[in-house]
Structures are given as C-alpha cells and as structure tokens.
Amino acid sequence: MKAFDWLHRHLGENVYEAIFFVEHVKFQYPLTSLLPMEVMSSVGLLHLRVYILVNLILTCATALGMGVLMLDLAARLGLSGPSDTLSARLKLASLGVLATLGFFPVAKAFSVGQIQVWLNAAFVLSTILYCRNRRWAVGMLLGLSTLIKPQMSLFLLWALLRKEWRIAGGWAAVVAVGTAVTAMLYGVKPMLTYLDVLSFIGAHGEGYYSNQTLNGLLNRLLHNGNNVQWLGDAFAPHHPLVYWATMSSGLLFIGFGLLWRRHDHGDGGILSFAMAGICFTVGSPVAWIHHFGILLPAFAIAFLAVARTAAECPQTANRNFQLLGVAFLLIAVDAFKPANALADTPFNILQSYMFFGTLILMTVLWRVATPVRQGRPLSFPRAALPG
C-alpha cells in the first residue's frame, strides 16, 4: 500500500529507488502486483479489513480445494477404496482440508497478511484444473501468479518444454494484458527498474531463519547478517561464497524442475507439475516460511502415489510413508523454533529444518515417479487412510 500510494503521487518515477533503496521498505514485487489494488481502489474497497476478509476467504478456498484435489488425484491415479463409498470419499476430502488448515506455512501467510495466500489458492486450483485437463485455465492462473511473483514465469518454460501449448497460451495472454495495463498506468521505465531489485536480492539474500533456502542456510552458517531477529530495513551483507552457491544451486533447482520427467504425460505429468512448483520456490535466493504453502499439492500427490504402491511393494511404501511423515512434520508443524538457540553455533544448520523437509519431499516424489509413470493398476489399501 505504501508503494501504491507513492506511485499515485509520483507517476512515472522510480518507486523502487524511493521505497526500496532509500526508505529501505522491502517492497520486492513487480509493479504488476499492484493491479489487484487498482481494482480494489476503483470500487472503494482498498482497505486492510477488506484485504483480511479476502485472505480469509482464499485460505478457506485453499483448504476446500485440497479436499477436492485429494479426490481428483485418487481418481486419476486409479486408486480403489477412496471412491468406493461416500464415507471413504468424505474421509479423504476431510484429510485434505484438515491437513491444509493445520499446515503452518498456510497459517503463517494468513497471520501476517501475505499475498502468498492468493498464490497458494491459485496453485491448488491450477493443480485441480491440470488434473481435469483444463490447460488454458491452468496457464491463466499461472499467468496471474506471475504478475505477483516473477518466479512463476518459469512455468512458461516448463510448458514449452513439454509442448503444453494451451498452458503457454493462457499464461502469455494474461501476462501480456497485465504487463500492458501496468505500463499504461505507471510507465515502462519504473517497471524495468524492478530488475535492480532482483539483482540486489540475488547478491545479498537473507540470513533470518525464516529464509528456508540454501542462501539462508549459508548466510547463517557463516554468521553473515541477522539470524533470529527480523530486520525490515536490512539484508545480509554480500558474501562471494554465498552469492555463487546461491546462483549455482538456483540454476540446478530450476533446471531440475524444468527437465524432470519432461516427456511424461498423464499421471507422470502431474508429478512433474508439483515438482516444478517446489523447485521454483526453493531455488530462489529468498523463500520465506509462508512461501512453502505451495508445497501442499506435492504432499497430496506424494501421499496418494505412495499409497498406490502399498499393495505391491509394502516395505518400500512404508519407507516412503515414513519419509513423507518426516517431511510433513518439518514443514507443517511450528515446533522447531528452539533450534534458534543454536544461532551462534556451527549447529545453526538445524535452523534450516524446512529446507531439509523440502528436500525429503522431493526425494519421495522421485521415488514414487517410476511406478506412477508405468501406470500399474494398484489397489488402494483402506488401512492407508486415517480412520
């Protein structure tokens, strides 16, 4: 809102120079992210109370969407059991809803008023639409997300590499319109200066424990910058080792997300879609705890994919369930802040618990990919579901 007000008082000027670099307010979004505020302002609804209400609605929608996604995935993966009776379907959908409402990154995004709430809802809905083969709509939702969070633009490359022309077309249509409208409102030059912000963030990163990336891990390990105290007007000092490790690991994560299972279609495609969402998030220099709400569909896919293999390979499935449980515990439960007591010791690597949980989740998706890709007709054991 500060950036929005400033721009309306200084049309065509460099908002990032004034807000980000001079006043040190961490407005780290492209100007296209202000379009929803323009809409709200035009109808007289640009108010914090309205914004909170919208976030509450979208948080509930995310939870309900995860319930729907669980049912869609069960049907897509050919699992017998969850779709046999109304009671079983209700249990499976309830599992998705309750797991979402108890997922700490989702609660954190809502509690701090983060626009990540919108992105969580959009990604869950786009995953549902992907399951239902609504590719244009998937692309449009990813395009809308890109207007707020530039990392989502990587899904354009993901789609092009897989010849998903409808996803690419939906993305391009939304981004083109959003960019054109933003240019007319604020001018092209202020939009381009956003590249300076991205360059600055990439060169510094954040050491605060909430940054659950390799950048955050290394900054903390080297005691480079703040660790347990949030500083809204400062970044970690530039460190060459951290910088090059951040850039290298980012390229590896992004490359893996773009290329993994590139030739898969059907069930394998949804695995690749979820993995890409993980990689594009954790491969960024800065990914706060609330950004990991985007992992929800990946957990649902991994859980049901592991359950699909339970009848044929029970020992392997048990190991995968255990790994998945550890990953969910590290990411979903806000129980590891005591690790901050190790901030000034070499053991502060334990502050990166969510980063490690994400790596474990990626490992489980990797392990279940082959049987899902082969499409073996496996039954869904009723004992695999709680209750």
Image: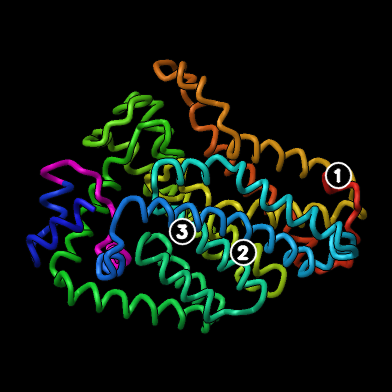
Q: Could you tell me which residue is drawn at 73 percent across and 64 percent down?
A: 73
Q: Is residue 322 left or right of residue 275?
A: right
Amino acid type, mark 2 = Ser
Residue 228 occupies which quadrant of the picture? top left
Instruction: Tell me, for residue 387, which label it has, or none.
Output: 1
Q: Can I make out residue 367 in this image?
A: no
Label 3–label 2 contact, CB within 8 A: no
- Distance from disc 3 to disc 1, alpha carbons, whole Å, reads 31 Å
Label 1: state its secondary structure. loop
Ranked by sequence position, the earlier of labels 3 and 1 is: 3
Q: Is residue 108 above or below residue 188?
A: above
Which residue was labeled with disc 2?
272
Q: Looking at the image, can residue 314 be seen?
A: yes
Quick one: label 3, few (<14), some, or many (20+) residues within 10 Å? many
Marks 3 & 1, CB-CB < 8 Å contact: no
The tag on residue 119 is 3
Between tags 1 and 2, which lies in front? 1
Label 1 vs 2, first from the N-terminus: 2
Determine crowd level at label 1: few under 14, some 14-19, many 20+ residues with C-alpha closer than 10 A. few
Query: Disc 1 and disc 2: Cα gap in Å?
Result: 30 Å
Residue 36 on the magenta segment? yes
| Relative horizontal placement of residue 245, taking residue 239 as reference (left or right) | right
Closest to the camera, between mark 3 and mark 2, is 3
Q: Position of residue 230 (x, y in %)?
A: 32, 30
Q: Is residue 255 left or right of residue 82?
A: left
Q: Nearer the viewer, mark 3 or mark 1?
A: 1
Instruction: Decide which of 217, 98 is in the foreground and name it.
Output: 98
Q: Disc 3 marks which amino acid? A: Leu
Task: Read off the magenta span.
Answer: 21-37
